[in-house]
Structure formats: structure tokens, C-alpha cells
Amino acid sequence: LPRAAWLFMVLGSGALAPSVGCAVGGGSPGGLAFEEGGDLRGGVPARGRVVGAAFTELVPARDLNEVSALVVVRLVMRLLAGIDRAR
């Protein structure tokens, strides 16, 4: 990722491996492990200023025990920690 002045990050829950977040509209095999998604969220702020972020494709009706929602919250926390470290 080249250094940039402004970054807007988007992560669709469907990009995660089904074992990480299965509450999506159209799941498919493969995808990012939690650590890979977290590394992206935590490392990108070092490359530029994050001006916004979107976490999409979470389907609460399919979220058994709210585990997928917890995954998204943890990824948001990794992003915020990366932004704080980059300041």
C-alpha cells in the first residue's frame, strides 16, 4: 500500500473466512483469518490518515450467539488502536 494522505477503509464481513464470521448474506469458502483482518486494520493507519471506515455485510439475523458481531467489534478496536499508534 503506497503512502497516502487520506484513506477510507471498507471491510465486508464476507471477506472473512466462514470460521471467523459466518453471519453474512452470501458466504463462500476461503477468506481472511481474524489475525489477517486485524493486521490489515491495525497496520493501514501507519500508511496514511484514516478518514473513515465501513464494516459491511453483517446479517444480525444469522448471527448465532452474536459471535460475528463480536468479531466486527474486535476489528473496529484494532483499527482504532492502529490509528492511535500512528498519531
Image (cartoon, helix red, strand yellow):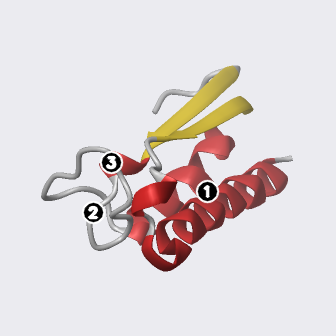
Label 3 to label 1, Cα distance in Å?
Answer: 19 Å
Asked where in the image residue 9 lies, by quadrant, the reply is top right
Which amino acid type is marked by label 1?
A: Gly
Q: Where is residue 28 in the image (x, y as percent from the top left)?
A: 16, 52
Q: Residue furthest front?
A: 61
**Residue beneath the point at 38% across and 59% down:** 23
Q: Say what secondary structure mark 2 lies in.
A: loop
Which amino acid type is marked by label 2?
A: Ala
The image's mark for residue 14 is: 3
Q: How crowded is mark 3: few (under 14 residues within 10 Å), some or many (20 or more)?
A: many
The answer to whether any part of residue 12 appears in the image is: yes
Asked where in the image residue 82 lies, by quadrant, the reply is bottom right
Q: How crowded is mark 1: few (under 14 residues within 10 Å), some or many (20 or more)?
A: many
Q: Position of residue 4 (x, y in %)?
A: 62, 22
Q: Say what secondary structure mark 1 lies in.
A: helix
Task: State which tag comes first along the sequence, 2 or 1.
Answer: 2
Q: Which residue in the protein does label 2 denote?
A: 17
In the picture, measured across the screen, residue 85 lies left or right of residue 70, that is right
Camera-side mark, 2 or 1: 2
Q: Which of 52/14 is in front?
A: 14
In the picture, measured across the screen, residue 13 lies left or right of residue 22, that is right
Task: State which tag comes first along the sequence, 3 or 1.
Answer: 3
Which amino acid type is marked by label 3?
A: Gly
**Residue beneath the point at 33% across and 64% down:** 22
Q: Which residue in the protein does label 1 denote?
A: 42
Q: Which residue lies furthest to the left in this view?
A: 29
